[in-house]
Image (spheres, rainbow, N blue to C red):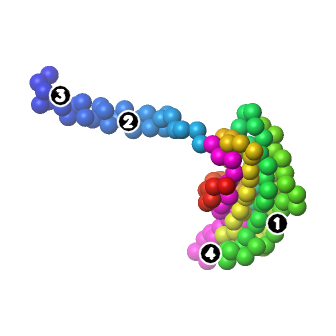
């Protein structure tokens, strides 16, 4: 193949390999000794031409992903759509051993947070650990129909 003909083929092949292998690229493991995590949630979604609310149950999941070190969850605060504190869930610090998980569940009928509530989760560890996974899972099921989705947390402050 002459070089002029081979060049577009090589470029297309390289781009294809980059796109195909992108999901398998290894990212650096992030470590921290504490964070504040913002977790968006939805107490309902709107459906139909009249924008009828469809209530959702919310489960906040906190997963310690470190295989050797524990973490301590020091605060889990639930805020409404306007940012006002609705409820504090962590009356005392909660220790999560290596690879342990915990959750908080709000039923479908709990719309105290309005349309777009959020959780603020604070955790700490005595030394840097693999970052935990903090996410909200929303599920609704009515009359044989169902909806579910996950909303990942986002770190807004390092300790």
Residue located beneath label 2 in the image: 18
Q: Which badge, 3 or 1, is on the more N-terminal residue?
A: 3
Q: Which residues are magenta?
A: 31-54
Say if the magenta span includes residue 51: yes
Residue located beneath label 3 in the image: 6
Residue 69 picture location, percent across and down = 75, 37
The structure residue drawn at horizontal position 25% and vertical position 34%, both measured from the top left corner, is: 11
Residue 35 picture location, percent across and down = 67, 54
Q: Looking at the rendering, which quadrant does residue 31 occupy?
A: top right
Tag 2 near tag 4, CB within 8 Å: no
Q: Which badge, 3 or 2, is on the more N-terminal residue?
A: 3
The structure residue drawn at horizontal position 63% and vertical position 70%, both measured from the top left corner, is: 46
Q: From the viewer's side, name the closer residue of 86 and 53.
A: 86
Q: Looking at the rendering, which quadrant does residue 68 occupy?
A: top right
Q: Crowding at label 2, few (<14), some or many (≥20) Cα neighbours within 10 Å?
A: few
User: Where's the C terminus, which quadrant?
Assistant: bottom right
Check the image and report above or below for 123 versus 96.
below
User: From mark 3 to mark 2, how far is it between C-alphas?
Assistant: 18 Å
Circle nearer the viewer, 3 or 1:
1
Q: From the viewer's side, name the closer residue of 47 and 132.
A: 132
**Element assignment for label 2:** helix
Residue 40 picture location, percent across and down = 65, 62
**Element assignment for label 3:** helix
User: From mark 3 to mark 4, how far is it between C-alphas?
Assistant: 55 Å
User: From mark 2 to mark 4, how far is it between C-alphas?
Assistant: 42 Å
Tag 1 near tag 2, CB within 8 Å: no
Tell me the tag on residue 51: 4
Residue located beneath label 1 in the image: 88
Circle nearer the viewer, 2 or 4:
2
Residue 7 picture location, percent across and down = 18, 31
Q: Is residue 139 visible?
A: no
User: From mark 4 to mark 1, how far is it between C-alphas?
Assistant: 31 Å
């Amino acid at each position: 193949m002459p070089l002029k003909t081979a060049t577009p083929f090589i470029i297309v092949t390289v781009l294809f390999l980059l796109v195909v292998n992108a999901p398998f690229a290894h990212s650096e493991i992030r470590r921290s000794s504490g964070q504040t995590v913002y977790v968006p949630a939805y107490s309902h979604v709107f459906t139909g031409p009249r924008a009828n609310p469809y209530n959702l149950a919310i489960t906040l999941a906190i997963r310690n992903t470190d295989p050797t070190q524990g973490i301590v969850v020091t605060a889990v605060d639930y805020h409404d759509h306007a940012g006002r504190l609705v409820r504090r869930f962590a009356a005392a610090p909660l220790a999560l051993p290596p690879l342990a998980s915990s959750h908080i569940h709000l039923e479908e009928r709990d719309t105290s947070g309005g349309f777009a509530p959020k959780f603020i989760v604070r955790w700490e560890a005595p030394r840097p650990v693999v970052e935990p996974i903090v996410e909200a899972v929303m599920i609704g099921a009515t009359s044989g129909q169902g909806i579910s989705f996950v909303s990942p947390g986002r770190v807004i402050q390092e300790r």
